[in-house]
Image (cartoon, rainbow, N blue to C red):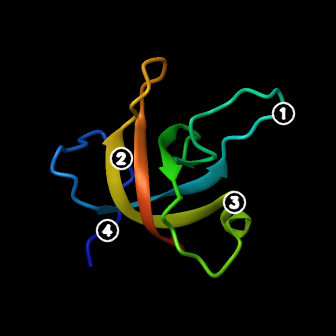
Amino acid sequence: MVAPRTDISDVTPSGLPRFIEGRFTSTRGFLGFRHPYNFQLMDKRGNRIAYLDISRLLLTENVQNFEDRIVIIYGTARRLQDARRKGVVIDVESLHLK
């Protein structure tokens, strides 16, 4: 089995899904600042790897059970289509605890 990646700096236009490992966290803050997505994937240093689009994810568990835990995500990475922000969004197809 191939080891999960922790960086997605090479987002390709081919749109092939891949495995990515990181800490699953919420983007909601107490100051009311709005992020484009409610969840994000963080690396070991606390830097954002990508926002997570979980709208098509089918889970039998509550998504809050995964918060602040190391997960392996399988999905397709794409550039954020927002003129004010730069970044990457992963369209999550599966989500598993490590």
Q: Residue at coordinates 72% horizontally, 26% vertically from top-left?
A: 33
Q: Which residue is mark 2?
A: 7
Q: Is residue 63 left or right of residue 16?
A: right
- Where residue 43 appears, as percent x and y from the top left, is 51, 47
Q: Nearer the viewer, mark 3 or mark 4?
A: 3
Numbered badge on residue 3: 4
> Looking at the picture, which amino acid does disc 3 mark?
Glu
Which residue lies at the image location 42% right of the left edge and 25% below the top edge? 86
How packed mark 1 is, by other alpha carbons closer than 10 Å (few <14, some 14-19, many 20 or more), is few
Q: Say which of marks 2 and 3 sits in front.
A: 3
Which tag, 3 or 4, sits closer to the chain's start?
4
First in sequence: mark 3 vs mark 1: 1
The image position of residue 1, as x and y in percent, is: 27, 79
Q: Amino acid at mark 4?
A: Ala
Dot 3: few (<14), some (14–19), or many (≥20) neighbours within 10 Å? some
- Name the foreground residue: 81 vs 64: 81
- Identify the residue position indicated by label 1 in the image: 30
Classify mark 4: residues with Cα within 10 Å, few (<14), some (14-19) or many (20+).
Answer: few
The mark nearer the N terminus, 1 or 2, is 2
- How far separated are the C-alphas under marks 1 and 2? 28 Å
User: In the rendered structure, which amino acid carries the disc numbered 2?
Assistant: Asp
In terms of depth relative to the viewer, which is nearer, 78 or 8?
Answer: 78
Residue 61 falls in which quadrant of the image?
bottom right
Which residue sits at x=58%, y=42%? 37
Q: Is residue 26 left or right of residue 12?
A: right
Q: Which residue is mark 3?
A: 67
